[in-house]
């Protein structure tokens, strides 16, 4: 079976269109991140999380009301899977055990603490730096690696593409009001590796073809992207499929993580087809 | 085909070793609750040790990050204090009886503690964080107390500029020889004492007792003590929890902790009790007065007793912390995470379900799209999963929920190697090459590409291992293991099968 007979799509010819699409996505992501601002998880801000399972269903309003009675108006309440499971995020110095006691007494219901997290403000700050550091280190390592294996132009173009992927993924997450947590950062790091993986396959084929084919960089790059197209689609497809099963069936804890991965895979695949070779092409022409 | 035989042997051997490493895990995780009870404890523990380790997020438990508060201490001193904290905390936890706790230093001042299966968060926090500074102070004589308290009252009145209102003394009551404060006034009195602290004569210190209920009212005793302790916890040689059976009717049947002092401590204690018969000696733990019994006679034996515990459990914990010694510096819990066992098993179920469904889709796709070759790739993928789990078990890696996600991601990503190879073989066949040479070129050309592409994933996985805490490290771990194993399974193993088909079975057409 084959999805594609030999394709001959003029990817590079449409590069200006791709630049515009990428530019718009990139800039609006930056704007969303700057204006709306990312919602950070307690990993980075410090604070507490209590995941509680009630015996019966309750509406969020009731939970909110109970919390307001003890002065926790600012607590964030989130349904977690069902109306029995709630995630409460707060910054007060109240132990989750006392929350459970209050719910049990006032709502007359059995309640159980499923998960707690407490992060001190200083640790949060440190994790913030560490996360940014990790993403930057990963990108620099990629730049070095590709610059060594290919050349600086491919290196810079690829890192540009990853930066574009990470920012757009982040933009989507902020737009969708997802929380930036350590697992989400891990997903972003994975995207860095994954998106580059795709770009390398394409670049590798370009390099191989440059040696044995005659023609301009433009033609050879186009041909190479077409040759690797079915592989790109299949691998991205299988990876996306497993990430989507994680997203829908993997349980609430992994949801933001899988969502970040899913967005990243889509954006990363697009950029490895449309962005990397185009940038190298235009850079080469200027010289 | 001699070479082919060797290659097959390598794969079979690797497979057998992998299965051997997995057997304890299979045995352990398929045990029924009743057979766990029947099994001898040592056998169960040894099996548990060899089985795949599940992270706290999957098996439930508690994770604590402690920080040593060493303001003004040098780096060296803080590091020493940290090591001492690790040692003491380990002793305390061992005495408490947690199975396989993990305690490790993080940086200069931090200690990471992982307690699998521990759900009693408050108790764990107390047991670990208690500095356990035990000191014995003489309680000031009644007239001294009166003088000092009057002085405080006077100074506070001057401050408030109202000589009529009694801000301090009016809140104090006498109750059975103690000066007590109602619990609801505790905060305000504490603030007044802090305010007046500069007027309290140097030789004294004011400390609170424990919250008690007397006649249905919650109160807290307030003590004026001699600042310099008569004796400290470093002279304790042993501490045991037990039930009081002595002569005091008010303590009858209550849990207590018996202390034995060492030689030097016995001498000091004997002298102090001899010189202060009739006075009270306060036993102070972490700046809270546990009890303040009257000294009735000289105690030459070096035995002392602490009362005032609510339960036997509390007495046991106090005995543990006193035995293991005082923490060299106060510690603060800067991060705490806990997961209940039910959520953990839910997570496992969700993870496995997502994994199986994802895998089925990928398997079906590969089989339909690449036919026989797809089945070969699927076989390689299954082998890969076995290798990942077995390497985790062999090297005592920990499987976490993100780790399961990593394995699932590997399912999607590891087929990439085979997709690259198969696509290449298809191209070579299309360009008119023979099957044999198409396979050889396909593998040869694709190998470099696969190496290049997968190395970047491994680099990010390593960054993840460095960046991540707990669960996320598990993700980096399974992801990198999966990618590394896929070199072996997706390239080496599948090539053997193709070579076997072409060279031995002399197949003329490959379904790809």
Image (cartoon, coloured by chain):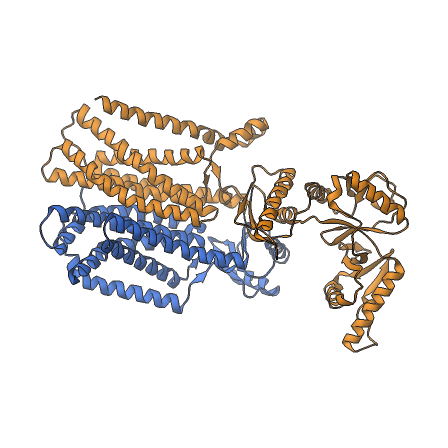
Chain colours: A blue, B orange
Q: Quadrant of the C terminus of chain A?
A: bottom left
Considering every residue shown, the one lying at the far bottom of the view is B161
Q: Quadrant of the N terminus of chain A?
A: top left
What residue is at 72 percent from the left and 42 percent from the top?
B319
The answer to whether residue B6 is visible is yes
Asked which quadrant contains residue B298, the reply is: top right
Residue A241: horizontal and vertical position, in percent? Answer: 31, 47
Front residue of B361/B408: it is: B408
Residue B282: horizontal and vertical position, in percent? Answer: 81, 51
Front residue of B389/B363: it is: B389
Along the horizontal axis of the image, is A244 left or right of B342?
Answer: left
Would you place residue A36 above or below residue A219 in this image?
A: below
The answer to whether residue A256 is visible is no
Residue B380: horizontal and vertical position, in percent? Answer: 30, 34
Asked which quadrant contains residue B93, the reply is: top right
Along the horizontal axis of the image, is B256 left or right of B324?
Answer: right
Would you place residue B267 above or below residue A118 in this image?
A: above
Along the horizontal axis of the image, is A189 left or right of A284?
Answer: right
Residue B376: horizontal and vertical position, in percent? Answer: 26, 33
């Amino acid at each position: 079976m084959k999805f594609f007979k030999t394709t001959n799509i003029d990817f590079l010819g449409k590069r200006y269109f791709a630049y515009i699409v990428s530019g718009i996505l990139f800039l609006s992501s930056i704007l969303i991140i700057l204006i709306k601002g990312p919602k950070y998880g307690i990993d980075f801000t410090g604070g507490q999380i209590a995941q509680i399972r009630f015996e019966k269903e309750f509406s969020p309003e009731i939970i909110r009301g109970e919390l307001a009675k003890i002065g926790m108006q600012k607590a964030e309440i989130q349904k977690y899977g069902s109306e029995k499971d709630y995630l409460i995020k707060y910054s007060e110095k109240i132990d989750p055990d006392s929350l459970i006691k209050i719910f049990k007494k006032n709502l007359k219901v059995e309640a159980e603490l499923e998960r707690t997290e407490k992060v001190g403000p200083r640790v949060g700050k440190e994790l913030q730096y560490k996360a940014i550091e990790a993403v930057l280190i990963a990108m620099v390592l990629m730049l070095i690696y590709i610059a060594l294996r290919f050349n600086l132009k491919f290196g810079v173009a690829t890192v540009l593409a990853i930066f574009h992927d990470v920012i757009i993924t982040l933009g989507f997450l902020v737009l969708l009001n997802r929380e930036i947590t350590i697992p989400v950062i891990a997903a972003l790091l994975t995207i860095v590796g994954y998106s580059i993986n795709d770009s390398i396959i394409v670049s590798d084929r370009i390099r191989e073809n440059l040696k044995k084919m005659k023609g301009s960089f433009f033609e050879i790059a186009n041909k190479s992207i077409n040759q690797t197209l079915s592989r790109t689609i299949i691998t991205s497809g299988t990876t996306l499929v497993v990430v989507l099963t994680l997203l829908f069936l993997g349980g609430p804890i992994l949801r933001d993580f899988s969502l970040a991965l899913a967005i990243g895979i889509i954006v990363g695949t697009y950029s490895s087809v449309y962005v990397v070779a185009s940038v190298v092409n235009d850079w080469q022409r200027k010289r | 085909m001699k070479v082919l035989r060797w290659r097959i042997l390598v794969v079979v051997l690797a497979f057998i070793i992998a299965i051997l490493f997995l057997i304890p895990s299979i045995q352990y995780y398929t045990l029924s609750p009743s057979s766990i009870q029947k099994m001898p404890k040592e056998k169960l523990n040894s099996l548990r040790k060899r089985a795949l380790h599940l992270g706290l997020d999957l098996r439930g438990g508690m994770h604590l990050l402690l920080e040593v508060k060493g303001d003004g201490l040098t780096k060296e001193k803080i590091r020493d204090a940290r090591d001492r904290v690790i040692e003491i905390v380990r002793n305390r936890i061992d005495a408490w009886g947690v199975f396989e706790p993990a305690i490790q230093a993080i940086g200069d001042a931090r200690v990471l503690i992982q307690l699998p299966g521990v759900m009693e968060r408050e108790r764990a926090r107390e047991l670990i964080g208690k500095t356990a500074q035990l000191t014995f102070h003489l309680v000031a004589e009644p007239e001294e107390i009166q003088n000092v308290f009057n002085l405080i009252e006077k100074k506070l009145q001057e401050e408030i500029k109202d000589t009529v209102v009694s801000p301090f003394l009016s809140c104090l009551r006498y109750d059975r020889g103690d000066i007590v404060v109602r619990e609801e006034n505790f905060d305000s009195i504490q603030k007044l004492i802090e305010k007046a602290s500069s007027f309290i004569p140097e030789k004294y210190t004011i400390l609170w007792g424990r919250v008690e209920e007397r006649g249905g009212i919650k109160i807290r005793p307030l003590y004026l003590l001699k600042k310099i302790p008569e004796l400290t916890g470093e002279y304790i040689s042993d501490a045991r929890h037990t039930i009081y059976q002595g002569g005091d009717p008010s303590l009858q049947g209550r849990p207590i902790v018996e202390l034995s002092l060492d030689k030097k401590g016995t001498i000091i204690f004997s002298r102090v009790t001899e010189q202060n018969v009739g006075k009270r000696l306060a036993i102070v733990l972490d700046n809270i007065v546990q009890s303040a019994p009257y000294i009735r006679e000289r105690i030459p034996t070096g035995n002392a007793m602490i009362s005032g515990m609510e339960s036997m459990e509390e007495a046991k914990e106090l005995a543990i912390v006193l035995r293991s010694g005082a923490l060299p510096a106060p510690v603060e819990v800067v991060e705490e995470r806990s997961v209940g066992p039910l959520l953990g098993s839910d997570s496992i179920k969700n993870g496995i379900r997502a994994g199986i469904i994802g895998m089925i889709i990928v398997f079906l796709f590969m089989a339909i799209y690449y036919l026989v070759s797809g089945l070969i790739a699927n076989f390689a993928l299954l082998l890969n999963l076995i290798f990942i789990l077995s390497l985790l078990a062999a090297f005592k890696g920990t499987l976490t929920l993100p780790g399961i996600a990593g394995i699932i991601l590997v399912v999607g990503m590891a087929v990439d190697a085979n997709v690259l190879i198969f696509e290449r073989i298809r191209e070579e066949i299309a360009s008119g090459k023979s099957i044999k040479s198409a396979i050889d070129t396909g593998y040869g050309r694709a190998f470099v590409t696969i190496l290049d592409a997968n190395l970047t994933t491994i680099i990010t996985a390593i960054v993840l291992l460095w960046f991540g805490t707990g669960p996320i490290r598990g993700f980096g771990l399974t992801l990198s293991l999966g990618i590394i194993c896929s070199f072996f399974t997706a390239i080496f193993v599948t090539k053997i099968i193709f070579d076997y088909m072409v060279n031995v079975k002399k197949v003329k057409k490959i379904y790809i």
